[in-house]
Image: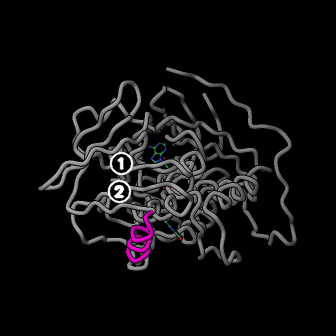
Amino acid sequence: MIKTDIIIIGAGPVGLFAVFEAGLMKLRCHLIDAIPQPGGQLAEIYPKKPIYDIPGYPTILAGELVDNLMEQAAPFKPGFTLGERADSIEKQEDGTFIVTTSKGTQHHAPVVMIAGGLGSFEPRKPLIDNLSDYEEKGVHYIVKDPDQFEGKDMVISGGGDSALDWAIYFAEKGSFVHLVHRSDRFRAHKDSVSRAHELAAAGKMQLHTFAEVKELEGEDELETVVIYTKEEKTTVKTALWFPLFGLSPKLGPIADWGLEIDKNAIVVDTFDYQTNRPGIFAIGDVNTYPGKLKLILCGFHEATLAVQTAYKIIYPDKKFTLKYTTVQGVQGFEEEQPKETVKS
Ligand SMILES: Cc1cc2nc3c(=O)[nH]c(=O)nc-3n(C[C@H](O)[C@H](O)[C@H](O)COP(=O)(O)OP(=O)(O)OC[C@H]3O[C@@H](n4cnc5c(N)ncnc54)[C@H](O)[C@@H]3O)c2cc1C
């Protein structure tokens, strides 16, 4: 059993910052995340995009912000259970909780903070019979590590920001890009649409409008993508296809934990971001309240207030006096937190 003060479900930016704020109060945290690396949406969807609205950083790459948050949390030696989804929560007689993951790892703590963002996000997949044969063998729903694809010819499908942004990015890095869209009207930013047309005119991209990828071929890996319009069929020899039709958020098992849910988000009290179940908090994109904004900055604020009440639950007889970090500094933990793992 992994024992800690606060179990944080979701190692996105908000979960990571909660470790720091809890650490300042001498509370230990253990994070659980379904994906194999920390960083949430920033690491999974847009690691190379610049963010402009983090206070004190006129611009910072999403991946860099994750690295910085990890560095900021490091003195407080958080534990991580990665690549495992938090599936169930059980309240114990003494009011504490046991959270069990998809792989059976059990975690025990008096407080649980859900920082699950959009939940476990699932890509919207096109309906092609043999699609799953080529997943991660040429077909990718998310561009995680663009460096490995730079300069390679590819097909990208979609008409939103993600499809246009990556088509432009790769065409500018020397790839020849076939951009395939069902209509001739793109939902992406106007500037991106103009830039795509410029790149097509310069011979670096081919736009296939009113078109759809309907067939995939290849021995073990993807070798050919077949694009259809009403009038014609175009066969493109390529080892890469990115169907970028967006991600559909799924709250997943959390939806069955007896929490009040409104439109796929957990309802909280803005006093301390506690849910209707005492001892269970929800911070970041996963929560909702009047005036909620799904921004990293807002999640940081929520985490800071939530740990104040968490402290009172964990130490009902102690009083915590807030001191500025400029006064008290950052005193991390010397020892790793003790843990035993139980797989059921
Ligand atoms: C393209 C794009 C650009 C953006 N640009 C900006 C911007 O410029 N500024 C800004 O402030 N915001 C921006 N955002 C929004 C920002 O990314 C989110 O507000 C932020 O990621 C929320 O952080 P979070 O920690 O609450 O959740 P997330 O980053 O979503 O992380 C949640 C984590 O919880 C995990 N999880 C969920 N359920 C479970 C479970 N049951 N078990 C285990 N793990 C689970 C998920 O795997 C995920 O890793 C952008 C978003 C996108 C998609």
Residue 36 location (% of width, % of height) = 56, 39
- For mark 1, does the 10 Å Cα neighbourhood hold few (<14), some (14 to 19), or many (20 or more) residues? some
Q: Quadrant of the N terminus?
A: top right
Q: Quadrant of residue 178?
A: bottom left
Q: Secondary structure at mark 1?
A: strand
Spatial CA distance of label 1 from label 2 is: 6 Å
Q: What residue sits 12% from the left and 55% below the top?
A: 231
Q: Which residue is mark 2?
A: 246
Q: What residue sits 38% from the left and 50% below the top?
A: 155
Which mark, by number, is residue 123? 1
> Type of residue at label 2?
Gly
Main SS class of the magenta portion in the image: helix
Residue 148 lies, with reference to residue 45, above or below; the image says above
The answer to whether residue 320 is magenta is no
Q: What residue sits 63% from the left and 66% below the top?
A: 304
Q: Is residue 124 left or right of residue 287?
A: left
Residue 220 lies, with reference to residue 266, above or below; the image says above
- The region drawn magenta spans 193-203
| Mark positioned earlier in the residue sequence (1 or 2) | 1
> Type of residue at label 1?
Pro
